[in-house]
Amino acid sequence: MDTSTRLQENISAMVDGELPACDVELTLAALSEPEGQAAWHLYQLIGDVLRADTAGGELGDDFAARLARRLADEAPGPARRAGDSEATPVTVP
């Protein structure tokens, strides 16, 4: 696991109150960087949405179709294997 991914997971765990004490110092250092601050904000927002009262926030009948269209518009390019110097298409299951 790369360092960036680990720090993202640590920030998420900190937001959830589940970060082990041994990881607090490193995670606090990550929060001083713009990427860490953005992650903190995102995880706080996700938590707010999950805790929100859903009354009046029901999904419309066409939600699934609209989501599918937006996801199709954001289709990623070919995946690359770590260490590849060229963009080599990889079949992703």
Image (cartoon, helix red, strand yellow):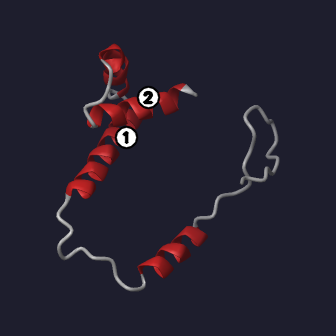
Position of the C terminus by quadrant: bottom right
Give x and y (percent) for residue 49. Answer: 26, 57
| Mark closest to the chain's N terminus, 2 or 1 | 2
Q: Secondary structure at mark 2?
A: helix
9 relative to 37 in the view: left or right? right
Answer with left or right where residue 78 lies relative to residue 25: right
Q: Position of residue 63 (x, y in %)?
A: 41, 79
Disc 2 designates what residue?
7
The image quadrant where one finds the N terminus is top right
Crowdedness near tag 2: few (<14), some (14–19) or many (≥20) residues, C-alpha within 10 Å: many
Residue tagged 1: 39
Q: Residues within 10 Å of mark 1 (few under 14, many from 20)?
A: some
Residue at the extreme bottom: 61
Q: Which mark is residue 50?
A: none
Residue 69: name its quadrant.
bottom right
Q: Residue at x 75, y 39 (%)?
A: 81
Residue 47 sits above or below residue 26 on the image: below
Position in image of residue 29 (x %, y %): 34, 21
- Mark 2 vs 1: CB contact within 8 A: yes
> How far across and how far down the image is residue 85, in percent?
80, 36
Is 49 situated above or below 47? below
In this view, the residue in front, 81 or 56, is: 56
